[in-house]
Image (tube, rainbow, N blue to C red):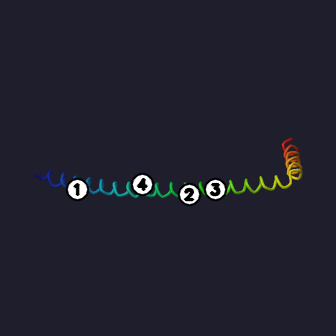
Amino acid sequence: MSNAKPAEDAAAEIARLRAEIETLRAGAEEKVRQTARTAETMAREMGEAVCQQSELVAGKVRERPLTALLVAGLAGFVIGRFAR
């Protein structure tokens, strides 16, 4: 009969640990969902910002195509010089 008490204690401890693990798992899942939602929101906002900036640049190029061509050529020249 002396083995019954330790076995009961061990079973109770295992049940407590399982419940604690389940609680931690559920909390971790929620954190992952929150992080994913935040990442999706940030990615969407960054995509919108990139689209707005590209539209702005495209508008400037349409307004002054010669200036845009000269700036692009100068940038290519400078990058080429530094690449050597």
Say what secondary structure mark 1 lies in. Answer: helix
Q: Is residue 84 left or right of residue 15?
A: right
Which residue is under mark 3?
Answer: 46
Q: Is residue 41 left or right of residue 14?
A: right
The mark closer to the camera, 4 or 3, is: 3
Residue 30 occupies quadrant: bottom left
| Circle nearer the N terminus (2, 4) | 4
- Mark pair 2, 1: CA separation: 44 Å
Pinpoint residue 80: horizontal percent, then vertical percent.
Answer: 86, 43
Using a 10 Å C-alpha cutoff, classify the residue at mark 1 as few (fewer than 14 neighbours), some (14 to 19) or many (20 or more).
few
Q: Residues within 10 Å of mark 2 (few under 14, many from 20)?
A: few
- Between the residue at mark 3 and the residue at mark 1, the CA separation in whole angstroms equals 51 Å
Where residue 60 appears, as percent x and y from the top left, is 81, 56
Numbered disc in front, either 2 or 1:
2
Query: Which residue is located at x 38 percent, y 57 percent?
Result: 24
Task: Give me the residue at 61% from left, 58% from top.
Answer: 45
Q: Looking at the image, is mark 4 or mark 1 nearer the viewer?
A: 4
What SS does tag 3 mark? Answer: helix
Q: Residues within 10 Å of mark 4 (few under 14, many from 20)?
A: few
**Residue that numbered label 4 is attached to:** 29
Tell us which disc is closer to us: 2 or 4. Answer: 2
Question: In this rendering, which labeled residue sits more in front, label 3 or label 1?
Answer: 3
State left or right for residue 18 relative to residue 67.
left
Indicate which disc, 4 or 1, sits on the residue closer to the N terminus: 1
Give the Cα distance between marks 4 and 3. Answer: 26 Å
Cα separation between marks 4 and 1: 26 Å
**Type of amino acid under label 2:** Thr
Q: Secondary structure at mark 4?
A: helix
Residue for badge 1: 12
